[in-house]
């Protein structure tokens, strides 16, 4: 079985757990299964260090120029997502990846990206509780699901609520891809309770 490439987008003022949480879920899932499931990596517009929310410096592994093919795209949120959606180069790259990949997931205010790209029109979505008002401006016909941790927004787009909800969505997608036993093995290693998943 060919390993799936999980690409996590980074940008300045990204929320740390938005990208680190899913990174941990998918990379640990692979680790505890003989590194057979995923190659997990970060990428950004350039390979220059990015400064996440609260000052964490992170080095993207790849730039837009050399990033490998991505099967699963993860778009985190954070304060920087407001600036991110103004960058047409970034939006074009995300759209290109999404057209060719297996699935895309957003975490927290990362939902702004599919909103401005028009992917959420008349579709359900989740985001951070403080972002729903802005989302109504960006995607007025989209359907907010404030009561949910995550939701399937369309055929291969999933959106999740704020920050820690990205971990729950990652486990949900892990089960969808590889089944419950892989989820349980991963959660046991991480000492993560799965009440939010089932």
Image: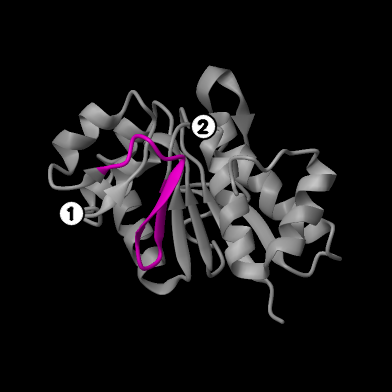
Q: Is residue 120 magenta?
A: no
Q: Does 38 appear above or below 43?
A: below
Mark 2 → mark 1, Cα distance in angstroms? 23 Å
> Residue at horizontal 74%, vertical 39%?
192
Q: Which residue is mark 2?
A: 163
Left or right for 87, reference 104: left
Pick the quarter of the image with the N terminus: bottom right
Residue 40 % position (x, y): 66, 56
> Label 1 neighbourhood size at 10 Å, few (<14), some (14-19), many (20+)?
some
> Residue at horizontal 61%, vertical 46%?
22
Left or right for 22, reference 140: right
Q: Which mark sits nearer the N-terminus, 2 or 1?
A: 1
Residue 121 is labelled as 1
Left or right for 136, reference 181: left
Q: Tell me, yes or no, if residue 47 can be seen here.
A: no
Q: Tell me, yes or no, if residue 125 can be seen here.
A: yes
What stretch of residues is rendered in magenta? 144-159
> Residue at horizontal 39%, vertical 26%?
79
């Amino acid at each position: 079985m060919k390993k799936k490439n999980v690409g996590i987008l980074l940008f300045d003022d990204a929320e740390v757990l938005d990208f680190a949480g899913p990174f941990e879920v998918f990379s640990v899932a692979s680790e505890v299964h003989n590194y057979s499931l995923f190659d997990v990596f970060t990428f950004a517009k350039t390979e220059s260090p990015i400064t996440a929310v609260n000052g964490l410096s992170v080095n993207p592994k790849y730039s837009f120029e050399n990033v490998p093919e991505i099967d699963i795209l993860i778009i985190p949120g954070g304060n920087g997502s407001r600036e991110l959606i103004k960058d047409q180069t970034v939006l074009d790259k995300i759209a290109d990846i999404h057209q060719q990949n297996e699935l895309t997931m957003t975490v927290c205010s990362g939902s702004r990206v599919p909103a401005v790209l028009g992917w959420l029109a008349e579709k359900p979505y989740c985001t951070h509780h403080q972002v729903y008002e802005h989302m109504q401006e960006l995607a007025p016909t989209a359907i907010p699901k404030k009561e949910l941790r995550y939701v399937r927004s369309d055929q291969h787009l999933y959106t999740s609520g704020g920050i820690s909800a990205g971990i729950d969505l990652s486990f949900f997608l892990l089960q969808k891809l590889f089944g419950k036993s892989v989820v349980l093995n991963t959660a046991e290693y991480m000492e993560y309770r799965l009440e939010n998943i089932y």
